[in-house]
Amino acid sequence: MKLVWAPVALNQAEEIADFIAADNPNAAEKWLSGLFVATERLADYPESGRPVPEIRRPEIREIVYGEYRIIYRVRTATVALLTVRHGRRLLSENDLG
């Protein structure tokens, strides 16, 4: 399957990395690199993440990376990475775009 990052998800990942970099640029670089590694496996194992509990739609799934949730949508030929958000933040249908 092909991985496709939504622009908003890329922007969120960049903002998180910038926040981390304010205290530790090396940690930010490591975090961002790890994020991309964690999401790459979704191309081969798109259903490895769990369904998002608050959405209750089987095609909307998530993986957890550190303190963050990576929310994605599984389609026939693509995995669309929709948002990267802190684990304490709930997702609503409006957040899906």
Image: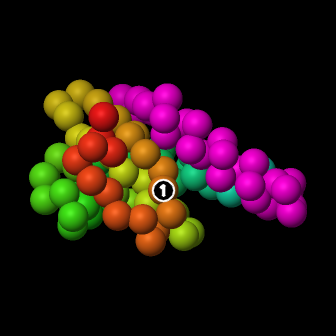
User: Which residue range is magenta in the image?
Assistant: 1-28
Q: Residue at x 49, y 35 (%)?
A: 8
Name, please, the residue furthest toward the left.
57
Q: Quadrant of the N terminus?
A: top left
User: Which of 48/87 is in front?
Assistant: 87
Q: Residue furthest front?
A: 94
The image quadrant that residue 78 belongs to is: top left
Position of residue 78 in the picture relative to residue 58 (left or right): right
Would you place residue 6 above or below residue 59 in this image? above
Is label 1 in a helix, a strand or a loop?
strand
Q: Is residue 35 visible?
A: yes
Residue 19 in the image: state x and y as whole percent: 74, 55
Task: Report whether residue 1 is seen.
Answer: no
| The image quarter in which residue 63 lies | bottom left
**Amino acid of disc 1:** Arg
| Residue at 56 percent of width and 69 percent of height | 66
> Which residue is drawn at the image coordinates 23% and 41% (left, top)?
74
Picture coordinates of residue 46, whole percent (x, y): 29, 47
Image quadrant containing the C terminus = top left
Q: Residues within 10 Å of mark 1 (few under 14, many from 20)?
A: some
Would residue 53 be found to the left or right of residue 67 on screen? left
Q: Is residue 75 magenta?
A: no
- The residue that disc 1 covers is 85
Instruction: Say how the picture is coloured.
Output: rainbow
| Rendering coords of residue 64 (x, y %) | 44, 65
- The kind of secondary structure the magenta stretch mainly shows is helix
The part of the image, by quadrant, that contains residue 4 is top left
Residue situated in front as seen by the camera: 6 or 48: 6
The residue shown at (47%, 44%) is 40
